[in-house]
Image (tube, helix red, strand yellow):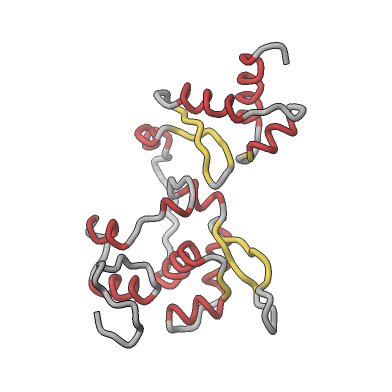
């Protein structure tokens, strides 16, 4: 390509034409091995104040509607995907502890997890099979997907809220808070003992 502007335009066109989010190396291969990192940064900056943003979610780049304009594109009759409490808990466990097996999910929840629960999460595109655990029986393990990050507006799993943020937002009732402590997603005070036998 003869000029940097040509590369930026080519990256832009590639992303617009893509049917799914692309990694930087995939864009690079499509454009003959060009270094596209600077072009992606320029495009992200260019689109930041516009109605469409270029965002990176889970290492993959795609265009999405600016968050403050999303309501304009929603259909009047929108199908709301409602997750059961079991599915919500399973999704939270997978997101915070991935990759995890069904047995590990059940150990944290304290109850059996129906196969349909994980099927619902996979049909939603939020959870995927990530392989098998190298232990006897080689159980299937599950992890979240780039669609999960995109749906919840996260760049990576590092952006998942901590227990303090959830509590501050009023999203935890006493049962939820106890559950969060059970799953290990808590913020410990500096003087909280680490020994398992000691009380908080």
Quarter the N terminus occupies: top right
Q: Which residue appears farthest toward the top when viewing the image?
A: 2
- Of residues 43 and 50, the one nearer the viewer is 43
Vertical position of residue 33 compared to residue 108: above or below: above
Query: In the picture provided, is 30 more to the left or to the right than 139?
Result: right
- Residue at the image point whose x is 67% and y is 80% from the top: 135
User: Is residue 124 at least partly visible in the picture?
Assistant: no
Which of the two residues, 83 or 55, is positioned nearer the viewer here?
Answer: 55
Report the front residue among 187 and 114: 187
Residue 66 screen position, x and y as percent: 41, 32
On the image, which quarter does residue 33 sit in?
top right
Residue 186 placement, left or right of 106 = left
Answer above or below: position of 49 versus 83. Answer: above
Residue drawn 51% across and 53% down? 148
> What quarter of the picture does the C terminus occupy?
bottom left
Q: Quadrant of residue 21?
A: top right
Q: For the view shown, which residue lies furthest in the bottom direction? A: 197
Q: Which residue is situated farthest in the right direction here?
A: 32
Q: Can residue 82 be seen?
A: yes
Counting every numbered tag in the picture gives 0
Image coordinates of residue 125 in percent, x first then y, are: 57, 55
From this view, report whether residue 118 is shown above or below residue 199: above
Q: Residue at x 64, y 25 (%)?
A: 11
Residue at the image position 52 percent from the left and 71 percent from the top: 117
Q: Is residue 178 left or right of residue 129?
A: left
Estimate the x, y position of residue 192 in percent, counting from the top left: 26, 74
């Amino acid at each position: 390509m003869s000029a940097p502007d040509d590369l930026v335009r080519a990256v832009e066109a590639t992303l617009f034409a893509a049917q799914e989010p692309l990694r930087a190396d995939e864009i690079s291969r499509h454009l003959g091995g060009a270094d596209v990192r600077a072009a992606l940064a320029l495009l992200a900056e260019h689109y930041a104040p516009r109605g469409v943003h270029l965002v990176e979610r889970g290492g993959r780049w795609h265009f999405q509607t600016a968050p403050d304009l999303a309501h304009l594109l929603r259909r009047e009759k929108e199908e709301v995907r409602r997750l059961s409490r079991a599915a919500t808990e399973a999704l939270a466990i997978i997101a915070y502890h991935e990759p995890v097996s069904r047995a590990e999910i059940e150990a944290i929840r304290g109850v059996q997890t129906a196969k349909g629960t994980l099927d619902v999460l996979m049909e939603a595109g939020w959870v995927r099979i990530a392989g098998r655990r190298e232990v006897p029986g080689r159980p299937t393990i599950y992890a979240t997907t780039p669609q999960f990050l995109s749906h919840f507006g996260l760049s990576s799993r590092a952006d998942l809220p901590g227990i303090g943020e959830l509590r501050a937002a009023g999203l935890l009732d006493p049962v939820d808070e106890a559950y969060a402590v059970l799953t290990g997603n808590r913020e410990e005070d500096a003087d909280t003992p680490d020994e398992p036998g000691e009380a908080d």
